[in-house]
Image (tube, rainbow, N blue to C red):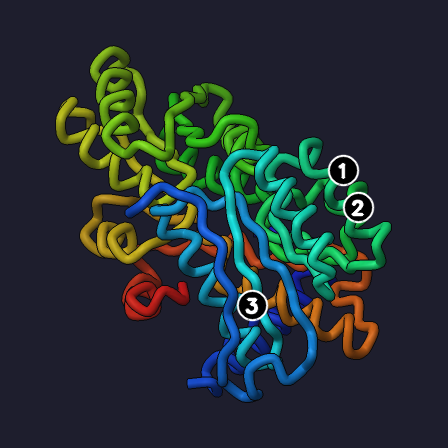
């Protein structure tokens, strides 16, 4: 895998710092809104800063548990008061950002999965003098929107690299499964796969309904026997794809983006070939920590460049080391 060397070094160093700090500190489908203050290395709220942490989470998606755990650990380590909220609908996420501005938080960390829909609310924060950090989605748009820093994976690079690995496995007609309409990150992943395997075909599913995902994939696999690989863009959809494969009799190879405990076990058991992991715990941890350091010390982590937390590949060669961390929702 080739990434920009300076950015990669920054990412590696920050990942080590994040995990070391964490070590020292020893469903439903409705949106959530919650505040976190906690112990860890500092007393709750001892820094005096309140940070709003806003995502496009669809509740029930285990990916976000890791993001949230990282953010909460960072809040404990820095003494920040963390206000977590989420909504998968872009206009409602924009409202959450505006609500954070109106409540006069000190900083905002937000996903930028639908940048055009969020641009107005982000500008409102910047106009109010509130620093904004992007994470997880929006790597190509965060500077345009005015965010100071960004923590996440280069999704095009991740997709391209995944496609190359599939091509090495002989794949000619992968099916790339997009579970959220309008997500620039998911579209970039599939575009990356297609750049390496031109026969890649996209399919849209409703990621909020696992049964519907399984039914849609089962029908597609039964109808088109030329599909020789399935690329899911989230771990829950990988589990749905395994069921669809079983029900349709498909022999397509399965790979996924992201991890949860069940998907990690499926890699161990050989049901999933590999996962492209963006290390969401680190994204949450560094988004909060970077805002704390910016507020306290004027730091600009990454020096204007995105800090890459992935792609990091998980397969049979390293699953034994990583599997225990998935059980703790930190990897």
Quarter of the picture holding the C terminus: bottom left
Q: Which mark is residue 120?
A: 1
Q: Report the number of discs.
A: 3
- In percent of width and height, residue 154 lies at 61, 46
Query: Gap in Å between the C-alphas at discs 3 and 1?
Result: 26 Å
Of residues 322 and 98, the one nearer the viewer is 98
Q: Earlier in the sequence, mark 3 or mark 2?
A: 2
> Which residue is drawn at the image coordinates 66% and 61% (left, top)?
8
Tell whether 137 sits left or right of 257: right
Instruction: Residue 128: tell me if it is visible.
Output: yes
Quick check: marks 3 and 2 in contact, CB under 8 Å? no
- In percent of width and height, residue 187 lies at 55, 30
Quadrant of res 145 = top right
Instruction: Residue 321: tell me if it is visible.
Output: no
Q: Which mark is residue 188?
A: none
Q: Is residue 268 above or below residue 86?
A: below
- In percent of width and height, residue 71 lies at 53, 66
Query: Gap in Å between the C-alphas at discs 1 and 2?
Result: 6 Å
Quadrant of res 122 = top right
Tell whether 66 sits left or right of 90: left
> Which residue is drawn at the image coordinates 56% and 74% (left, top)?
75
- In percent of width and height, residue 129 lies at 84, 58
Of badges 3 and 2, the one in the foreground is 2
**For the residue carrying disc 1, how many other residues have a C-alpha within 10 Å: few (<14), some (14-19), or many (20+)?**
some
Task: Say which residue label 2 marks.
Answer: 124
Considering every residue shown, the one lying at the far top of the view is 223
Tell whether 304 sits left or right of 321: right
For the residue labelled by badge 3, is the local secondary structure a helix, a strand or a loop? helix
């Amino acid at each position: 895998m080739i990434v920009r060397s300076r950015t990669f070094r920054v990412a590696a160093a920050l990942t080590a710092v994040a995990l070391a700090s964490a070590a020292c500190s020893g469903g439903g489908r409705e949106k959530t809104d919650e505040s976190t203050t906690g112990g860890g290395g500092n007393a709750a709220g001892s820094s005096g800063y309140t940070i709003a942490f806003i995502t496009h989470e669809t509740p029930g998606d285990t990916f976000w548990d890791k993001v949230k755990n990282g953010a909460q650990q960072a809040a404990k380590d820095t003494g920040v008061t963390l206000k977590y909220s989420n909504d998968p609908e872009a206009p409602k996420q924009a409202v959450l950002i505006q609500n954070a501005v109106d409540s006069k938080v000190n900083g905002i960390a937000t996903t930028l999965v639908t940048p055009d829909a969020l641009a107005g609310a982000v500008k409102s924060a910047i106009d109010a003098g509130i620093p904004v950090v992007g994470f997880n989605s929006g790597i190509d748009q965060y500077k345009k929107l005015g965010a100071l820093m960004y923590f996440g994976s280069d999704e095009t690079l991740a997709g391209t690299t995944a496609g190359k690995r599939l091509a090495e496995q002989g794949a000619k007609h992968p099916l790339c499964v997009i579970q959220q309409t309008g997500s620039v990150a998911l579209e970039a992943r599939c575009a990356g796969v297609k750049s390496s395997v031109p026969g890649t075909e996209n399919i849209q599913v409703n990621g909020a309904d696992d049964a519907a995902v399984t039914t849609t994939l089962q029908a597609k696999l039964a109808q088109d026997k030329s599909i020789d690989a399935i690329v899911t863009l989230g771990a829950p959809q990988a589990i749905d794809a395994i069921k669809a494969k079983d029900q349709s009799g498909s022999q397509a190879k399965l790979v996924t983006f992201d991890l949860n405990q069940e998907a990690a076990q499926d890699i161990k058991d050989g049901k999933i070939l590999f996962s492209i992991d963006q290390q969401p715990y680190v994204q949450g941890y560094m988004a909060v920590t970077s805002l704390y350091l910016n507020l306290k010390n004027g730091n600009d982590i990454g020096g204007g460049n995105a800090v890459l937390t992935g792609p990091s590949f998980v397969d049979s060669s390293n699953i034994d080391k990583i599997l225990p961390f998935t059980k703790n929702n930190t990897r």
